[in-house]
Image (spheres, rainbow, N blue to C red):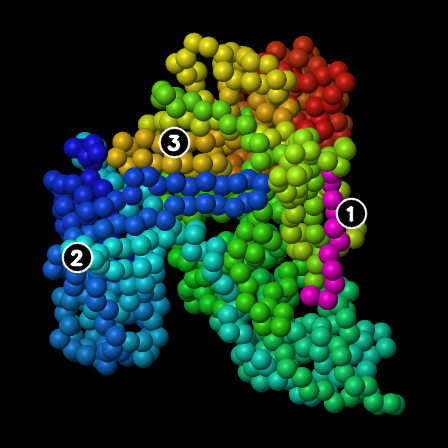
Amino acid sequence: MRFAERTVAIVFEGIGNDVTKSGGIAYAFGRAPSGASDYEWLTDTLIKIPETITTSVDVWTGQVKTSPINVSVANVDLAARKLLYQQARTDDTVTAALLAATDFIELSKTGLSDTVVFVGNEAIKLGYALGNLYACVRGYWGTIAEPHAVGAFVYARNPFLLYRTYRLIVYDHTSQSEQTIQRGYISGIQTNNEGTTIEIACQELLALISRAQLNRGAPKINVTGSVSHNAEIGGQLTNNVDMTSRVWRDDSDKPVWLNVGGTIALGFVVSGEWVPFLTGAAVGANAPEIEFDQLDNAQSSPFSEDAYEMFVIVRSLFGSAASLSSSGGLGASGAFNAVQLAYSFLRSGRGASDSGDDQWAGNWGLGLPAEYFDTAAIEALIADSASDIVQRLILGWDGEAVEIEDLVFNKLLRPRGKFLANTQSGLITIGAISLLDIEEFAGAPILTPIAPRLQLTIDLNGAFSAVAADVGETPWSDPDRIVVESRTAQSQDSSRRALYDTRRELVYDFSTLYAGGDNLGIQATLLSRLMAGIQAVPQVTIDVVESSSATYDLGSWFKIAAPEIHQAWWVDASGERVEFPVTPDAQLTGVLVGRKYNISSGLYTLTLLMMQYRDNKFIRWRAPAGLVVSYANIAGTYHITIAQNEFHAGSSDASKFSPNDYVQLFYADGEPAAGGDGVLVLSVTGNALEVAATIDAPVAGMILRLATFTVYGNGGSPVAGAGRAYVFYADSTTGIIHGSEQADIYG
């Protein structure tokens, strides 16, 4: 292995020895860095390391695969004392509650200055003491600061090793830089047969997350009281119930939902008692009436039955009031945003607040810290996913545990084209499969393949003949099934596949939407995925070097530079073998679905899915556009004010234009305003553009976009379509499609 200029090391959370080294021990394969370091480097103690680190995603199923790793550490004295021992008992405790940000701690024991103690998951370095009150440094030896209650046990040695996190790092001596290449948890520790090495089994973060469960051990709640008879809204619970919510940390005046009497009931906890509000169909669409023994000629009937607390989102309730859903702390928009909900289920359970990403108690969240996530990327995706609405979500019926894989992967993300993944540095992120727009294409890094790897794979198993959606399933009703099949209701495969293989049908769980009503959006989604499956979208696999300017994150778009080969190798969607690149204006572009890092060579093997292949198109161009708010004629030029964030969620629409752009005004129906083929942008200031005057003065509601000349269109012809004047679609010559096809349908 070529490690002359690189050192590989593994760092475990909470494993340290030198109290002056905040990063803990780095068990290393190779030499230690020459400069200052936060780690205590134990060189040549890492005996065995993995050859590669692999992550991939199946965009059709949403399944993410990651590689577990096993490392061997020399069984030297310091390694044995830190990795083969857990302190089981202690009499020491925290005597005053502290928050995650508190920099002093009160303990039951004195004389601990200049030591590191363990409380919960956290290692804390103790400093100067005044009696039993210590100044402290929080989150030591790679741990993360967290709140601690009075009575929390304090350990002098590590109290547990199972599920401690690890980071596999590579240090480059030339650039004096450190790179994390994988993160995860310890899943097992043992020595080898001779006792000379310590064998540590590790699982990547996503692998363990997918197996996790929420709402484990939900207790029964006995509801005893009465049900009032109401001819209009059905039977209604009337008596209070003593209970403490498992959803909320502070359940005062929070919505608390119960499964009781075969239906759902909404109430609020006041002074330790659940006070019923509405029951049955009055609070949940098509919910059954509560089951009770009705007495003749009585206003109410006695009632006694076991119940379970549930996690419930009901968006249509009283004008979509977020305050009545278990997700209300996320606000009016976040409470029903599928991506936000997925993120919050992973984050909640760690802090002490009932709002924000970490808003629910530990029963309804994995409690993963923010430091484990690519927060900026996830928040940007949440902002762009306003249309990914959850209308109804009912969890914990009959007290059952909820699988994270079923909830986050299958219910919230996969039906909406999203998936959990990890970044190049091992952080958890949420990716999305979508068409490529012009901004992404322009900013997509260019990959230069290294010979000899340049592999084209035809996805023979990708062809499937039907895509289905199960819509609106509830504990009391079956789902509506929507099925979109190929034209012949069969795969294009030969009859042999029917004999030797199973029919491939994708089924998406849309239980978070109401059954019935307008399902055109779901049908369009299914049709798009069916077409991709029928065409068996190909993949291209290449080897590339590490890059200082780009990160190889799953779900990102990349362009492939012309490889150093002299023959045609790409087969297009028409079955013809063509030279590469196909045109000087359109590069082969794909979304990253697989990443393998070779630790010894430092090379990456990347697999890109050619999502545009089925249309024989390379890019969906979405050119800069702005919605006109107002204008002023100043000294013969128009100063046009553009609305914020109509077309770009993350930045000002006006900022997408530049001086010297040629632009044109369009009415909302796609009809161009009079004024020639385009006018020059003179300046861009904030939300305003200064342009040369046109014949038609701007009117509020018009759309300003790049003019339709050769670079942006075919022969200067505009794209018509009500409200869609800003949409462009490129073919292999980067021109707008005209003639029998309407570009607007691709928007």
Q: In the rendered structure, find residue 194 and report the number of the disc placed on it.
A: 2
The answer to whether marks 1 and 3 mark residues whose Cβ atoms lie closer than 8 Å is: no
Which span of residues is magenta-colored? 475-485
Position of residue 697 relative to residue 396, above or below, is above
Query: Secondary structure under badge 1?
Result: loop
Which residue is drawn at the image coordinates 14% and 69% (left, top)? 113
Q: Which residue is mark 1?
A: 518
Q: Mark 1 is on which residue type?
A: Asp
Q: In the rendered structure, find residue 50 and report the number of the disc placed on it.
A: none
**For this view, does 3 lie left or right of residue 270?**
left
Q: Where residue 46 sits in the image (x, y, percent)? A: 19, 48
Sooner in the amino-acid sequence: mark 1 or mark 3: 1
1 vs 3, front mark = 3
Which residue is drawn at the image coordinates 75% and 37% (left, top)? 489
Which residue is drawn at the image coordinates 20% and 71% (left, top)? 156
Q: Which residue is mark 3?
A: 605
Q: Mark 2 is on which residue type?
A: Glu
Quarter of the image for the C terminus: give it: top right
